[in-house]
Image: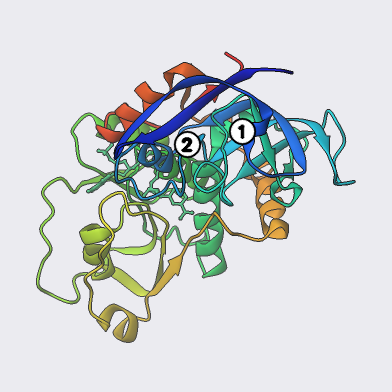
Amino acid sequence: MEEFKSYVVRETDGEVTHQLETNTVENLGDGDTLIKIEYSSINYKDMLALQKKGGVVRHYPMIPGIDLAGEIVRSESDKFEAGDKVLITGYGLGTVHEGGLSQYAKVPHEWVVKLPEGLSTKDAMVYGTAGFTAALSIDALEKNGMKVEGQPAILVTGATGGVGSVAIQILRHLGYKNITATIRKDYQEEKAREFGASDVWDVSDLELGKRPLNKREYKFVVDTVGGDLTADILTKVDEYGSVAISGNAGGMKLQTTVLPFILRGVNLLGINSVEIPMADREILWDKIANEWNVLDKLHFDERGLSEFGEVAEEVKAGKHIGRTVINTQN
Ligand SMILES: NC(=O)c1ccc[n+]([C@@H]2O[C@H](COP(=O)([O-])OP(=O)(O)OC[C@H]3O[C@@H](n4cnc5c(N)ncnc54)[C@H](OP(=O)(O)O)[C@@H]3O)[C@@H](O)[C@H]2O)c1
């Protein structure tokens, strides 16, 4: 392999540009493991990687793409052999280290997960970082008391997005039926219900109320939006309920009081898919491939490497729904 294609983000005189380029293995960063990438996927962070002040790219030029699935070409680790099918999510992929929107990646072997039995490289990226984060959020809520018995009231925010849409579909698959989805455009209601929401909450003109506590409406929350929406939700979580927060699509600041925590015993659970230890990753991917497998239901589309910029624009404009996999060899 002499030359191949990578999507590259560059910064010149303070301006950020991005395009498909011809590349060589020397430009892939440090790593003892070379992977031929078959699929990557589009996540919110990938859209941010193309923005001037996106805040995620640590150096330029950068190959974006925070996840990938493909085949081992060579590795210095005896855990892997040429031909093994593998995936990576998180660590510094696509932000600190050259990422998955390329036909090859060179990475430390410590980042690499062997594909669980029954999951193809494409399947893995249909879930991708977003699906993995959805699973991580549900796992955290179940570890904090969420059970199908009793059908607790569950809220999923950003429900038409990658994390939210996969979360609803896994929850439904596990037997949860009482799921409210937040939307902010009329046409999203039909999609949210298709994913499995039993109710929708239009948050498009949400105004933060003054009361520190409101009527208890939800017991468990998968929150991908953050900001004022999280602040409002915290006032409405039932006694000893939990909010698994992974996102900041709606803002970084969280204005709250201590009352939900000290008067209702609410838990705010931080979800970080980037640094989660390898043993936990492997357990969760195994669940995703087996008892939590919703591949037959997941909504996704497939695009080529050169189309990444267009998909990122759709994400930025809030016009993107569900998941998009990128066929990097196309
Ligand atoms: N913690 C982690 O490890 C981790 C991992 C993955 C993702 N994330 C984060 O999770 C978030 C979601 O990621 P994603 O890939 O699912 O993104 P996505 O596909 O773009 O979905 C974002 C969702 O949030 C909604 N939204 C955006 N701004 C909102 C606002 N102000 N009020 C209400 N809803 C709003 C969007 O609705 P519209 O379509 O109407 O805009 C969309 O439904 C991002 O912040 C991402 O960085 C974190």
Residue drawn at (18%, 71%) of the image: 214
Label 2, residues with CA under 10 Å away: few <14, some 14-19, many ≥20: some
Q: Quick one: which residue is furthest to the right in this view?
A: 78
81 displayed left or right of 55: right
First in residue order: circle 1 vs circle 2 = 1
Relative to 264, residue 295 above or below = above
Q: How many labels does the image show?
A: 2
Q: Which amino acid does label 2 sit on?
A: Pro
Residue drawn at (49%, 37%) of the image: 62
Residue drawn at (34%, 37%) of the image: 160
Quadrant of the snapshot with the C terminus? top right
Relative to 136, residue 25 above or below = above
Q: Nearer the viewer, residue 21 or 166?
A: 21
Label 1, residues with CA under 10 Å away: few <14, some 14-19, many ≥20: some
195 displayed left or right of 262: right
Q: Which amino acid does label 1 sit on?
A: Asn
Are discs 1 and 2 less than 8 Å apart at CB? yes
Residue 119 x %, y %: 70, 32
* Secondary structure state at the residue bearing disc 1: helix
Residue drawn at (26%, 51%) of the image: 250
Q: Which of 139 and 214 is in front in this view?
A: 139
**Mark 2, residue position:** 61
Q: Quick one: which residue is furthest to the front in this view?
A: 13
* Secondary structure state at the residue bearing disc 2: loop
In whole angstroms, how far apart are the C-alphas of marks 1 and 2?
Answer: 9 Å
Quadrant of the snapshot with the N terminus? top right
**Mark 1, residue position:** 27
Residue 236 in view (yes/no): yes
73 displayed left or right of 144: right
Residue 84 x %, y %: 82, 33
Quadrant of the rendered image containing residue 218: bottom left
133 displayed left or right of 240: right
